[in-house]
Structures are given as structure tokens and as C-alpha cells.
């Protein structure tokens, strides 16, 4: 069963960010036999000074394949947040099976990118749709972003990946087919949305990032004619422009 786990506001200005904790949580879920981590996405929410975010007001969503029930996952993830969230954070957790995330939750995620939302409405929406949602530290304001994270991940066209298989281990020159075979990437496209041929050689920079497009893990590349490769992954600024 595919399950989405949203977390938000687990950090402070001095600590490692929510993305780091999301990767640690994913690693521990796998090591403890609770699920197979498929990917972790970062979702940018409304950037407004009236919202008490730490630095960028983004949340994270883990996608796992698991035969465990949500209650078992809740206990593990809640314990992780209680023990690892930074002092002064307002950590929130949301967990639901992929198929249970309805249009109302997707709309909540889309709304979180453009308007200010409330904890009261987040809890009411989760209760109405039988979605687990809880806060663990501080004001518990992270429930807003954690609910938004699973909605945006289900929507399938928002966010960039903080983790897919081998994303942090593979850098250098590879063929498109090697990238597709050895990572979680499902499609490689040019900036003109052209599919890249399997034997095309691509330079992966040390911090390359796929994005979530049309429910797929997609890596975008741009033409770069060099002696040992024809393409290179696009810049971080380009990724931000198409994923925020």
C-alpha cells in the first residue's frame, strides 16, 4: 500500500532543516522494516511575514510502500518527531494512505500556497476525511503544512525531490538509461519537454534534483555539447522556478 507522510516545522534557525529530518525518518522507516521509501518531496507554501515559519515555509512529504497499518506508522513517526524536532519548533505530522487523500485535501495543499490557513480548519478537514493529523511541539502549527504536503504530493505537480534512490550517490556522466535503471527517476526531459534518448550522455552535478511533474519523478536537462556528454542537469534556480 502506498502511504504519504507529511511533516512540517520541525526546525529552528540553528538546527538542520525539515528536509534533513525527513531523510532521517525515511532511512529509519526502512531500517526498521516499516516501509520501502520511494521518494521525499519538498513543497513550498505561502511566503508571508504573517506566517510563523522558520526560514522558507516549506514542508516535506515521504512516500512509502508499506504493509503496516497507519497506527503503527503513527507511533513510530510521532516518537521520531518528539525526539528529533528542534527546540522552539511547532512540529506537525500527517499520515494517510494515498488512495484516501481526496480532492478536499488536494485543495487544502493548493490553498496553502496562496492564502493563510488555520489549525482549526486543518483539524476539521482531517477529521472529516478520517486523516491522521497531529502536532507535537510548540504551537503545533506544523499541522497546517503537513496536511498541505500530502495534498500537494497527491496532486502530482508540485515540489522538488529531497531524496530518490541513489540521488545523493550518483554524480558524474551517465547515460539516460543508466539513470532510469539505477535511481528512482521515471522520466528525463529537456527544458523543451523533449524525451532524452536512452544512450544520451548526461552530466549529473553533485546536487541534482528531480521534480514532481504529472505524477512522475522527472529530471530536466539542458543541452551542453562536451567531449564526454551531450546534456547536463538544469541549475538549482531553474528547478526552483518550475517546482515552487
Image (cartoon, grey):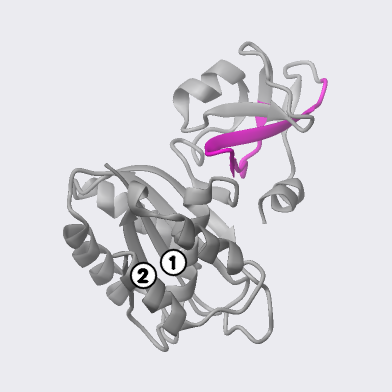
User: Is residue 77 visible from the viewing direction of this image?
Assistant: yes
Which residue is identified by label 1?
147
Instruction: Classify 18 as above or below 86.
Output: above
Residue 9 appears anywhere in the view: no
Q: Which mark is residue 126?
A: 2
Q: Return the disc, 2 or 1, that comes first in the chain's sequence.
A: 2
Picture coordinates of residue 149, whole percent (x, y): 48, 61
| Image quarter of residue 140 | bottom left
Residue 193 vertical position relative to residue 35 in the rendered view, above or below: above
206 is within the stretch colored magenta: yes
Query: In what element is the residue under mark 1?
Result: helix
The kind of secondary structure element at disc 2 is helix
200 and 95: which is toward the camera: 95
Residue shown at 45%/79% (left/top)? 121
For the point 59% across and 72% down, the residue is 57
Confirm or deny contact between disc 2 and disc 1 (CB under 8 A).
Answer: yes
Mark 1 crowd level (few <14, some 14–19, many ≥20, 10 Å Cα): many
- Residue 165: x and y, percent? 43, 37
- Decide: is 78 above or below 87: above
Which quarter shows the C terminus? Answer: bottom right
Instruction: Compute the Cα span from label 2 to label 1.
Output: 8 Å
Q: Is residue 140 above or below residue 156?
A: below
For the residues carrying marks 2 and 1, which lies nearer the camera in this image?
2
- Residue drawn at (79%, 30%) of the image: 192
The spot of residue 215 in percent (x, y) is 53, 39
Q: Which residues are magenta?
A: 203-225
Amino acid at each position: 500500500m502506498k502511504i504519504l507522510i507529511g511533516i512540517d516545522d520541525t526546525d529552528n534557525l540553528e538546527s538542520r532543516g525539515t528536509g534533513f529530518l525527513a531523510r532521517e525518518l525515511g532511512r529509519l522507516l526502512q531500517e526498521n522494516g516499516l516501509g520501502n521509501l520511494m521518494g521525499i518531496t519538498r513543497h513550498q507554501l505561502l511566503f508571508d511575514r504573517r506566517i510563523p515559519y522558520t526560514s522558507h515555509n516549506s514542508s516535506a512529504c515521504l512516500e512509502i510502500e508499506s504493509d503496516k497499518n497507519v497506527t503503527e506508522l503513527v507511533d513510530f513517526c510521532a516518537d521520531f518527531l518528539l525526539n528529533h524536532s528542534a527546540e522552539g519548533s511547532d512540529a506537525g505530522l500527517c499520515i494517510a494512505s494515498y488512495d484516501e487523500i481526496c480532492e478536499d485535501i488536494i485543495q487544502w495543499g493548493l490553498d496553502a500556497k496562496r492564502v493563510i490557513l488555520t489549525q482549526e480548519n486543518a483539524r476539521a478537514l482531517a477529521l472529516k476525511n478520517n486523516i491522521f493529523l497531529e502536532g507535537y511541539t510548540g504551537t503545533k502549527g506544523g499541522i497546517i503544512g503537513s496536511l498541505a504536503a500530502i495534498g500537494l504530493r497527491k496532486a502530482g505537480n508540485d515540489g522538488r525531490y529531497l531524496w530518490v534512490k541513489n540521488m545523493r550517490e550518483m554524480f558524474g556522466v551517465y547515460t539516460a538509461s543508466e539513470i532510469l535503471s539505477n535511481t528512482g527517476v521515471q522520466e528525463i526531459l529537456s527544458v523543451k519537454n523533449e524525451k532524452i534518448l536512452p544512450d544520451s550522455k548526461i552530466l549529473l552535478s553533485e546536487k541534482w534534483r528531480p521534480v514532481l511533474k504529472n505524477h512522475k519523478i522527472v529530471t530536466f536537462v539542458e543541452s551542453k555539447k562536451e567531449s564526454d556528454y551531450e546534456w547536463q542537469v538544469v541549475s538549482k534556480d531553474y528547478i526552483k522556478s518550475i517546482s515552487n
